[in-house]
Image (tube, rainbow, N blue to C red):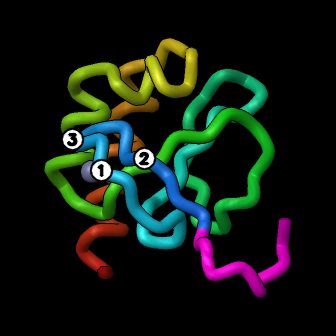
Amino acid sequence: MMRAKSKHLPQRTCIACRQIKEKKALIRLVRAENGVAEVDISGKKPGRGAYLCPKKTCWELALRKNRLDYALRTKLYDDNRQILLECGHNLLEES
Ligand SMILES: [Zn+2]
């Protein structure tokens, strides 16, 4: 899995806009054991993951329209959703 000799870079679909992009161009979110969703900067945390473009529009769409809930097969609490939104804004501003 970790070998880099393949020309085919791993690709993932953004859960908001459905565009397929290189995995490293997307931000991974993961459902932790307690059902709470968190941003996975390393991209290596265990658990069910979902990917989003580093774009505010995708981020907000995914969180406001419950796309993330669906992708992670969980029900996000409002405060969890809020934290993720803020997290996203911080990430997006840095990039
Ligand atoms: Zn997107």
| Residues rendered magenta in the picture | 1-9
User: Decide: marks 3, 1 in contact (CB < 8 A)?
Assistant: no
Going 63% across and 81% down the picture, which residue do you hit?
7
Mark 1 vs 2, N-terminal side = 2
Q: How many marks?
A: 3
- Mark 2–mark 3 Cα distance, whole angstroms, equals 16 Å
Q: Which residue is mark 1?
A: 19
Around disc 2, counting alpha carbons within 10 Å, would you say few (fewer than 14), some (14 to 19), or many (20 or more)?
some
Q: Nearer the viewer, residue 37 or 1?
A: 1
Q: Which residue is mark 3?
A: 60
- In this view, 20 is above or below 68: below
- Mark 1–mark 2 Cα distance, whole angstroms, equals 6 Å
Q: Is residue 60 left or right of residue 29?
A: left
Q: Is residue 87 left or right of residue 64?
A: right
Going 38% across and 50% down the picture, which residue do you hit?
52
Looking at the rendered image, the quarter that the N terminus falls into is bottom right
Q: Nearer the viewer, residue 16 or 36?
A: 16
Around disc 1, counting alpha carbons within 10 Å, would you say few (fewer than 14), some (14 to 19), or many (20 or more)?
few
Q: Which residue is mark 2?
A: 13
- At mark 3, the secondary structure is helix
Q: Position of residue 16 (x, y in %)?
A: 28, 38
Of the two numbered discs 3 and 1 in the rendering, the one whose residue sits closer to the viewer? 1
- In this view, 79 is above or below 43: above
Of the two numbered discs 2 and 3 in the rendering, the one whose residue sits closer to the viewer? 2
| Amino acid found under the numbered disc labelled 1 | Gln
Mark 3 vs 1, N-terminal side = 1
* Residue at the front extreme, as displayed: 7
